[in-house]
Image (tube, helix red, strand yellow):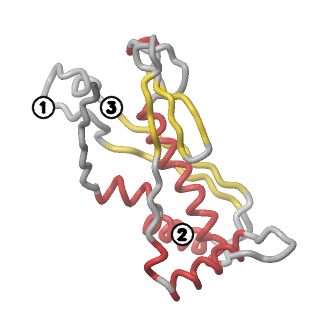
Amino acid sequence: MTITGTVPTLSQTVEGFSSALTASPEAGTITPKVTTQHQSGTATTVTVQAGPHNFVIDEPETLGGANAGANPVEHLLASLATCQVITYQVWAAKLGITVETLEVDAHGDLDIRGFFGVDDSVPAGFNAINTTVRISGPESAERYAELSAAVEAHCPVGDTLTRGVSINTDVEIQP
């Protein structure tokens, strides 16, 4: 949606996309992509390209890395927490709810025995992820509960993590 001469508000963007996707549901499928590459000469440093953005992911020194960036599980937590923040903003605009401040913390327990193969009965990933949402504004507790329910139902990263998806991997051996 484009509004000539002005930057659209989030409410205008949400309304424009909602209308366009109702009219053309097939336009709703997008395919985000990232490309990662191990940095030569390092143990665990990985460069990531996500669209026009580049960043580094690494392990802390205690796990053999150089601590050149947050590690993959921290990025997973950050993906969930930031997706929740954005989903709160989108749904606040959609529901006409005012949000003055919004902060999300995410944490989880990870038993690294699974990652290192020390105990195959231990999952390699999180056992659970917990988030804490701190929100303020002039709305009633009931309105913020309505907003929270909408976020729980519509957060793409939260949905992916709780629903689970298949991961299909092709390995190409290069000469």
Mark 2 secondary-structure assignment? helix
- Name the amino acid, label 3: Leu
Q: Position of residue 160 (x, y in %)?
A: 36, 57
The circle on residue 145 is 2
What secondary structure is marked by label 1? loop
Q: How much space separates mark 1 and mark 2, taking CA atoms? A: 38 Å
In this picture, residue 13 sits left or right of residue 161: right
**Quadrant position of residue 101:** bottom right
Q: Which image quarter holds the N terminus?
A: bottom right
The residue drawn where x is 25% and y is 36% is 172
The C terminus sits in image quarter = top left
Mark 3 against mark 2, which lies toward the viewer?
Answer: 3
Side (left or right) of 1 relative to 18: right
Secondary structure at badge 3 equals loop
Left or right: residue 121 versus residue 132 is left
Front residue of 35 and 89: 35
Q: Residue 121 carries which label?
A: 1
